[in-house]
Amino acid sequence: MRAYEADERGLASILTVCNYLQEAAGNHAFHLNLAVDQLLKQDLTWVLARLHVRMNSYPRWRDELAITTWPSGANRLYALRDFTLADAAGHPLGTAASAWILLDVKNRRPVRVPAEVAALALRDRPRAIEEAFSRRLDEPSQPDAERNFVIRVSDLDVNQHVNLVNYIEWSVETVPAEVREKAMLTDLQVEFHAESVFGDEAVSRSSGGREGDAWTFRHGVYRRADHRVLAVAATTWAPRAG
């Protein structure tokens, strides 16, 4: 892990982890001849629609991280992909599951997952997280924190809209500083609702607090101009060891 991918504690941030997951997914998709740059020739692209990450611990600066990923299922709307994360010695760090939509780039509408893509699923391997992504996440009720953001060129991905990881970043920004200081994000769920582009203004809101030994928050990111929901997330934070 590189220095610029570390947080103030010298650990990988959840943003770094999620970027690694996307990169691993893209590299494996390229191996399968199904990567974004390959599909664009057919006016198709992948969009990460849902993501669920569970972390036991985070790698430190200069640590090596091994990510294993595989197609884990499909339905009419989503192609599913799972991940495991481990350190150089093979000790588990976390797991993740994701759901991807195949999008027609001309009309910006989803396309049914092709049978040949669904057939790639490794049915004999246990899911990293038993997640069907059938339940929608709740928006924050009576938000008690809010941050505003203006979308920059650097926030855009190859599909020319805001990368889902940016919504994660903006969601985490609303968690109280005292929680981030003494707790670690152990569970993240996020879903994409709508695109946003360069120049849009976004507002991130959250609600939540202490629940037993942990802290839980509901997050929503909205486009300020029309109040459209861009993304919804849920985070759980556990006390740091030591």
Image (tube, grey):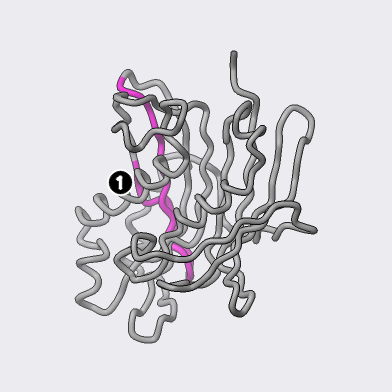
Residue that appears at 75% across and 46% down = 208
Frontmost residue, 20 versus 62? 62
Q: Above or below — where is 216 with respect to 112?
A: above
| Residue at x 59%, y 13% (from the top left corner) | 242
Q: Is residue 138 left or right of residue 54?
A: right
Quarter of the image where the N terminus is located: top left
The dominant secondary structure in magenta is strand
Residue 152 location, quadrant: bottom left
Name which residue lies at 51% across and 33% down.
Answer: 55
Farthest residue, direction top: 242
Count of labels shown? 1
Q: Which residue is mark 1?
A: 24
The range drawn in magenta is 69-88
Image vertical order of residue 56 relative to residue 147, above or below: above
Q: Position of residue 110 (x, y in %)?
A: 44, 77
Q: Is residue 131 left or right of residue 37?
A: right
Specify whether residue 193 is painted magenta.
no
**Residue under the image location 58 percent in, 52 percent down:** 171
Callout 1 crowding tier (Cα within 10 Å): few <14, some 14–19, many ≥20:
some
Up-down relation of residue 145 to residue 198 (above or below)? above
Q: Could you tell me which secondary element the residue under label 1 belongs to? A: helix
Residue 132, position in %: x, y?
56, 54
User: Where residue 84 appears, x then y in whole percent?
Assistant: 41, 36
Closer to the camera in the image, 222 or 110: 222
Kindly give the residue lying farthest to the bottom in the view shown.
Answer: 107
Q: Amino acid at mark 1?
A: Ala
